Image (cartoon, helix red, strand yellow):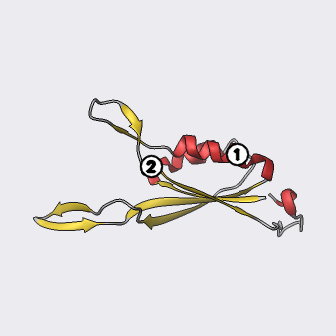
């Protein structure tokens, strides 16, 4: 089993939830703030300048069977990818669409039935 964690733009959450409705796995959702490698953004409000270096994000978590890892990661990559317009107005992938982390899960236990392993998912 693998735990898949993804940090994505908050405007992609609805699409992710729709995609996960078609999968046999649950989804944990966190509202977070994140700071990537990007520069601070300057914002002006009421004639005062503010610098923003953290942005609202969503973190999702799920645990999947080993055979479904690639499929679920591909779904997240496809749905969560963001785009921008280049100087010619063409739609191109944005650099800061988020990250996906995959880690090993030793076991899972369903509290109500005591089932463990893939059966608990």
**Nearer to the camera, 64 or 18:** 64
For mark 2, what is the residue? 11
**Nearer to the camera, 59 or 84:** 84
Task: Assess disc 1: are there few (<14), some (14-19) or many (≥20) residues with their C-alpha within 10 Å of its C-alpha.
Answer: few
Residue 90, by quadrant, is top left
Q: Secondary structure at mark 1?
A: helix
Q: Residue furthest front?
A: 37
Task: Assess disc 2: are there few (<14), some (14-19) or many (≥20) residues with their C-alpha within 10 Å of its C-alpha.
Answer: few
For mark 1, what is the residue? 70
Q: Secondary structure at mark 2?
A: helix
Residue 46, by quadrant, is bottom left
Residue 114, by quadrant, is bottom right
Residue at 37% x, 66% y is 54
Residue at 68% x, 46% y is 72
Residue 121 location (% of width, % of height): 80, 57
Q: Is residue 50 left or right of residue 84?
A: left
Residue at 63% x, 43% y is 74
Label ID, residue 114: none
**Nearer to the camera, 97 or 114:** 97
Point out the tag, 1 or 2, that comes first from the N-terminus.
2
In the rendered structure, are the residues bearing label 1 and label 2 in contact, judged by CB atoms less than 8 Å apart? Answer: no
């Amino acid at each position: 089993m693998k735990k898949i964690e993804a940090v994505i733009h908050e405007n992609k959450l609805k699409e992710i939830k729709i995609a996960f409705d078609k999968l046999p796995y649950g989804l944990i959702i966190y509202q977070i703030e994140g700071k990537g490698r990007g520069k601070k953004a300057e914002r002006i409000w009421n004639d005062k300048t503010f610098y923003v270096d953290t942005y609202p994000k969503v973190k999702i978590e799920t645990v999947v069977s080993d055979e479904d890892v690639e499929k679920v990661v591909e779904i997240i990559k496809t749905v969560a990818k963001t785009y921008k317009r280049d100087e010619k107005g063409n739609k191109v992938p944005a650099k800061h669409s988020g990250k996906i982390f995959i880690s090993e899960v030793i076991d899972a236990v369903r509290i109500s039935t005591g089932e463990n392993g893939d059966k608990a998912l």
